[in-house]
Amino acid sequence: MRAFAARGDQVAIHYREAAATAAALRDGLPGGGHVTVRADMADAAAVRAMVDDAAGRLGGLDVLVNNAGIYVAHPVLESSYEQWQDAWRATLGVNLAGAANATWCAARHMVARGGGRIVNVGSRGAFRGEPAHPAYGASKAGLHAFGQSLAVALAPHGITVASVAPGYVETDMTAAELATPAGDVIRAQSPFNRVATADEVAAAVVYLASPEASWASGAVLDLNGASYLRLAGAVFAVDAPRDRAVADVGPVPQVEPLPAVEERGRLVVDDRDRHLGAVAGVQDPLVVPAELGREVPDVSGRSHRVGMDHQPARVVVVFPSARLERDGVERDERPVPYLRHGDHLPEYV
């Protein structure tokens, strides 16, 4: 709020119960024209009324920051079934559904103004997990995914959507815990041996809401002081000849030879997500003529293509009784980037 107001923006401060605190924050902001608006984020009707109220009193909406959230402990083996349900209902209602509803409402005001910015405040818990607060971790993971979906949906209207994923932040809510011995453990999670300040998170939010950040739409920006790295699961070894770190790949699976079949059709599927390492030799694909809209005879086979430079594998598969559809299928013998068929896909790796 302060970061936006310092730039000359008019700000609407949302609150649920703490009217006096919200009013004090409003009155302490630089500039003028700031307002407070009330809503229970788990109440869809209240959210719509709140967003419309803010837009009316501010003269429109240019930026929405989805920052409301609750953090309810509910360890799976220590909670009753009723407590478990209550925690999930409340957490998803505020953290995810509330943000989704606010976005739905705000987007309509932004479209009318020719564009806007939406920034979701997620969490590193979406990636590393929250063992005692699983609904919180799930809600933030959902919020990140929601933001990426809306980034695509709203781009044609000039609206960008991005997210930040903070770790621990020094606020009034965390001050008591950070002052205990547990605070030392929390600070030690980061190699900087501290937690974030609210100003650091605010600076990232303001950036993502700026015109300069329009190309970051769809991004999730980690703000955790290297306390959690999303690529930390990779294993590395030293490649002595070139003196650099390379991914340590396991044993390379053997390529099964193609069975003897009548060569009557070729369908190609790219396996872009699987890293198989280097395979000695390359098998040619099964080659047979195939016409658009006609069934391929019952043939089967498989072949792996893997370059010595560890490029992603290409897997060539002939599916039994597959029908070539027009969507993405080439009529000649070049690779088919997309195949629709009604038969069960055989395992090919």
Image: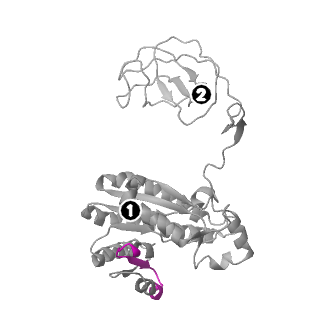
Q: Residues within 10 Å of mark 1 (few under 14, many from 20)?
A: some
Between 131 and 79, the residue placed more toward the observer is 131
Residue under label 1, please give it.
Answer: 210
Between 330 and 123, the residue placed more toward the observer is 123
Q: Quadrant of residue 253?
A: top right
- Residue range (magenta): 6-21
Which image quarter is the N terminus in?
bottom left
| Figure check: 336 above or below 258 | below
Residue 59, image x and y in percent? 27, 74
Residue 154, image x and y in percent? 34, 55
| Figure check: 11 above or below 347 | below
> What residue do we see at 71% from left, 65% from top?
188
Task: Report if residue 1 is visible in the image.
Answer: no
Which image quarter is the C terminus in?
top right
Task: Report if residue 271 is visible in the image.
Answer: yes
Secondary element under disc 1, as helix, strand or loop, is loop
Secondary element under disc 2, as helix, strand or loop, is loop
Residue 68, image x and y in percent? 48, 72
Instruction: Report the amino acid beneath label 2.
Output: Asp
| Figure check: 247 above or below 22 | above
Residue under label 2, please give it.
Answer: 309
